[in-house]
Amino acid sequence: MQIWTQNYDPFGNAVLSTAAAAIPVTVLFYLLAVRRIKAHMAALYALLSAMAVAAAIFRMPVQMVAGAAAHGAVYAALWIAWVVVGAVFVYDLTVESGHFETIKGSIGAITDDRRVQMLLIAFCFGAVLEGAGGGGAPVAVTAAMMIGLGFRPFETAVVCLMANTAPVAWGGMGNPVRALAAVTGLPEADVSATMGRILPPVAAMLPFYLVRSMVGWRETFQVWPACLAAGLSFGGIQFFWSNYIDPNLVDIMSGMGAILFCAVFFKYWKPKEEFYFPEERGKPRQERRRYTAREVVHAWSPFALIAVFVILWGVPAVKAVIAQTSYAAPVPGLHQMVLRTAPVVEKDVLDTAVFSFDWLASVGTATVLAGLVAGPVLGLSMGTTLRVFRGTMYRMRFGFLAILCMISMAYVIRYCGMDAVLGLAMTHTGALYPVFGTLIGWIGVALSGTDAGSNALFGNLQVVTATKLGLDPVLMAAANSTGGVMGKMVAAQSLIIACVAAGIEGKEGDLFRSVAKHGVALALVVGLLVMLYAYVLPGVVAHGHKFW
């Protein structure tokens, strides 16, 4: 079989080619947001449209199209859907065992205020989960926890998606930074440090944005000290760790540091007027039971086990042992058969495509194992624990299918070159490129669902374009990653995960309409900050940086 070269202008007209490349994404969001059909069916139709466009318009051989879709399905099953299953499984165990009442009570011991509870769970704890493993775990776990506490399902899905943005650039133990450094050849320390000078200001204001999205201005200003405490503690540690320590533990340390700081802060500060949802107001408040430290630790142990297992899975010695169980095989007819060319890459590159059946290495396996240990720890028999697991799997079957179809679509788009066409459309913007370059990263994450994936795809394009326009390559590479994180909330698999975790399957279209405006607004904030660094404060960009 001959090598196939990606064509970035199949119609010989940039506008028509860009419109063709946008067909699969347009189909997906039209079906979700306008027709409001079930997510797994919308994802299936979008996948079929992507395969049709790839074969008929971009002239990708049919066997390559099928191979790309299969490659995406394997990755989705092991590295995304499996993670969500594990996270929801652990939550279901806490409910089955009755310990979720203790979790609610322990948070209530800090505060009953819904705004502050949201900051502690969605913003702070979600960052720890993102840093440890990423995938769908942060949204799945935090949404499930908040629903159990009595939050409204739809609003919970919105804030959990929005909160899972600022930590994403260093998610999965710093994987996006490593991916960006690998494809661009830029020093990892320079990339991490520059990212750490773009995102922390946004992270510091994000708690205000999250609270305002849930309540009105008056209620937001009532908790401005809480927002400031969460934002500054998180953003400060994020800046320090990404600049002076390493890119691997940025989110874990930022999230844990923010939780500890807020827990102490809220002992001395309380909002003058506690906020409850309208349906909760007027109801007599139940007398709060006091839990012992041992009871609280016992109830929270499943989520602590998730963090322990996921972090353990990232330890080099453990990874070396796990790697011995891995099995990999080239994707037939696709591996090193697709040629990427300029201007997407500086030198021609043959794309790799390898089925990686790393079932044990998956973060999802670590999470499920944490659940299997947590069941008996919570007092459940192993039989009951397995019954809960089967129930979780059955309940998530359609969400699982939707994720598989969505990632398969993203892989077809990637190997076909459609995403490169969309990215190239943004490069014809001259002096405004710092903003539009940031939006390229946003598009990459919105399509692929991962910041590392967007960096792998567009990182070198950013460097090549920045060099041609006289901009700093390190800045634009960092902009790809930091702008990309704001696309996480509108990625189709993120929407599906949020709906499954919140128990509002079928509302993916409504959720997309609710978060899309926030995703674009926050990406523009990042873009304007990048433009400021490009033309006014170029000294902010790191060069020759070294960690302590």
Image (cartoon, grey):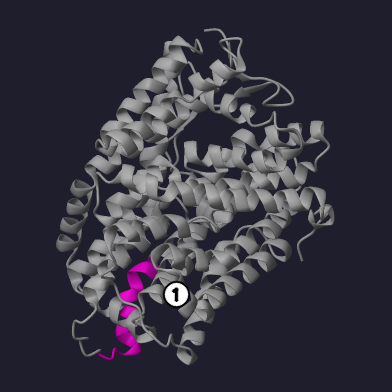
Which residue is located at x 69 percent, y 68 percent? 240
28, 137: nearer the viewer: 28
Residue 372 seen in the figure: no
Tell me residue 82's x, y (percent): 34, 47
Could you tell me if residue 20 is visible in this image?
A: yes
Looking at the rendering, in which quadrant would you find the C terminus? bottom right
The image position of residue 532, as x and y in percent, is 75, 52
x and y, in percent, of residue 269 in the image: 48, 89
Using a 10 Å C-alpha cutoff, classify the residue at mark 1 as few (fewer than 14 neighbours), some (14 to 19) or many (20 or more). few
User: Could you tell me how many numbered marks the image carries?
Assistant: 1
Q: Is residue 264 rendered magenta in the image?
A: no
Q: Which amino acid type is shown beneath numbered disc 1?
A: Arg
Residue 156: where, in percent of width, then height?
Answer: 34, 61
- Pointer 1 residue: 218
In the rendered image, the vertical position of residue 99 relative to residue 489, given as above or below:
below
Residue drawn at (53%, 46%) of the image: 520
* Left or right of residue 217: residue 228: right
Q: Height in image: 370 above or below 181?
A: below
Q: Main secondary structure of the magenta part?
A: helix
Magenta region includes residue 296: yes
156 sits to left or right of 229: left
| Residue at 21% over, 90% down | 287
Q: Is residue 329 left or right of residue 381?
A: right
Q: Nearer the viewer, residue 336 or 35?
A: 35
Give SS at disc 1.
helix
Range shown magenta: 289-305
